[in-house]
Image: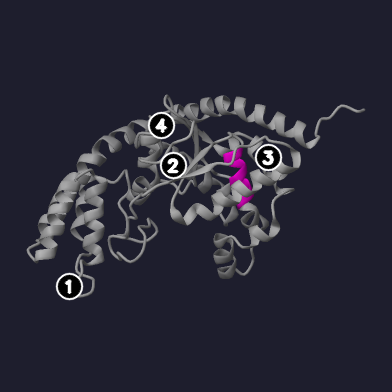
């Protein structure tokens, strides 16, 4: 990673339940790398999951499965802070304080809000103020680096603007977090390589906990032949990207050369990818089974980490409250 990594990193992931290869390649692999390089705060952001309709039990299940898969994929609570957002109430307190300085015009121009509000007949306030809570997530830990993709830069820039406004109004409390641009591969659907991998579409995704026979079958059925003449079909590109995710760039390069000279055998590509994927997934699946058999351990990991991160959260909130005039002694 060529960019300068700050002294503290924050990143959050919404609890969508068990994770698939796209989640793993897009975020979790990066988390596992970062935890060996700097002080990392990784949060399962369950408050953010409330902006769309949901069932309470389903949310609890999704949070638990997300925690299981993060741990199974290598996020190590001995190397980083892995915690549940709602277990640290300072997130919402800071979000309210920041919302009193956040620019409403900027919030209304956020791409995610505009896209979702255009598709919905009714939009809740939480969806509109989502970026303020996101800013609070980052600023609460005084993170100076945030791993983001190009499509997330708008939200981080708003966080920087909110920090800048707060500091100008109340004094220097927050650093302006810098983007840590990630070049995470974009993993597409195995059945429609023009769309992102999604577990809601049958045949689209490979889940981190899938049995080996399921993985083998999914790769065997993966689409390869769609595309323009004389161009690498997007389905083939997707399979080659997955080979690279499995740390087999050498094989991917060879198959790309075969594709260019017209000698590629898709059966050989799928076989090589299946073997590489299973090598990556086996230890993850083993750890996942162990964690699922010990749910109390998973809850204890999240609970212990929440206690740890709240120490910093309370310190920052105390400084914020003092800066804005809360809890002030009478003159």
* Residues at marks 3 and 1, CA–CA distance in whole angstroms: 54 Å
Q: Is residue 55 visible?
A: no
Q: Secondary structure at mark 4?
A: loop
Badge 2 or badge 4: first in the primary sequence: 4
Q: What is the quadrant of the C terminus in the image?
A: top right
Rendering quarter of residue 310: top right
Q: Is residue 305 visible?
A: yes
Question: Does the segment drawn in magenta span residue 27?
Answer: no
* Residues at marks 2 and 3, CA–CA distance in whole angstroms: 25 Å
Callout 3 crowding tier (Cα within 10 Å): few <14, some 14–19, many ≥20: many
Q: Which residue is mark 4?
A: 35
* Residues at marks 2 and 1, CA–CA distance in whole angstroms: 41 Å
Residue at left 58%, top 70%?
A: 118
For the magenta stretch, what is the residue range? 131-139
Q: Secondary structure at mark 1?
A: loop
Q: Are marks 3 and 1 in contact (CB under 8 Å)?
A: no
Badge 2 or badge 1: first in the primary sequence: 2
* Residues at marks 4 and 1, CA–CA distance in whole angstroms: 42 Å
Q: Which residue is mark 1?
A: 230
Determine which of the numbered discs, if any, sits on residue 94 in the image: 3
Q: Give the image's coloring scheme.
A: one colour
Instruction: Give the image location of residue 30, x and y in percent.
Output: 37, 41
Specify the farthest residue to the bottom.
229
Badge 4 or badge 1: first in the primary sequence: 4
Q: Secondary structure at mark 2?
A: helix
Q: Which residue is mark 2?
A: 66
């Amino acid at each position: 990673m060529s960019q300068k990594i700050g002294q503290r990193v924050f990143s959050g992931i919404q609890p969508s339940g068990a994770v698939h290869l796209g989640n793993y390649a897009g975020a979790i692999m990066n988390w596992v790398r970062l935890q060996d390089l700097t002080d990392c705060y990784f949060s399962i952001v369950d408050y953010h999951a409330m902006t769309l309709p949901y069932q309470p039990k389903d949310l609890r299940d999704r949070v638990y499965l997300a925690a299981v898969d993060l741990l199974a994929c290598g996020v190590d609570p001995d190397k980083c802070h892995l915690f549940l957002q709602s277990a640290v109430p300072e997130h919402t307190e800071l979000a309210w304080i920041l919302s009193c300085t956040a620019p409403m015009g900027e919030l209304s121009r956020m791409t995610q809000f505009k896209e979702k509000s255009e598709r919905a007949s009714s939009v809740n306030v939480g969806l509109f103020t989502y970026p303020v809570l996101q800013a609070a997530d980052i600023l609460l830990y005084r993170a100076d680096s945030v791993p983001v993709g190009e499509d997330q830069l708008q939200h981080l820039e708003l966080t920087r603007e909110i920090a800048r406004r707060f500091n100008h109004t109340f004094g220097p409390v927050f650093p302006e977090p810098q983007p840590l641009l990630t070049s995470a591969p974009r993993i597409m659907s195995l059945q429609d390589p023009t769309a992102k991998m999604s577990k809601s579409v049958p045949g689209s995704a490979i889940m981190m906990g899938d049995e080996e026979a399921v993985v083998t079958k999914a790769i065997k059925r993966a689409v390869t032949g769609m595309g323009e003449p004389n161009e690498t079909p997007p389905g083939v590109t997707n399979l080659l990207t997955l080979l690279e995710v499995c740390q087999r760039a050498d094989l991917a390069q060879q198959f790309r050369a075969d594709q260019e000279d017209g000698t590629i055998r898709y059966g050989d590509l799928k076989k090589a990818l299946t073997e590489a994927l299973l090598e990556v997934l086996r230890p993850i699946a083993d750890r996942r089974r162990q964690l699922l058999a010990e749910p109390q351990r998973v809850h204890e990991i999240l609970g212990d980490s929440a206690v740890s991160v709240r120490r910093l959260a309370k310190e920052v909130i105390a400084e914020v409250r003092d800066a804005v005039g809360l809890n002030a002694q009478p003159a």
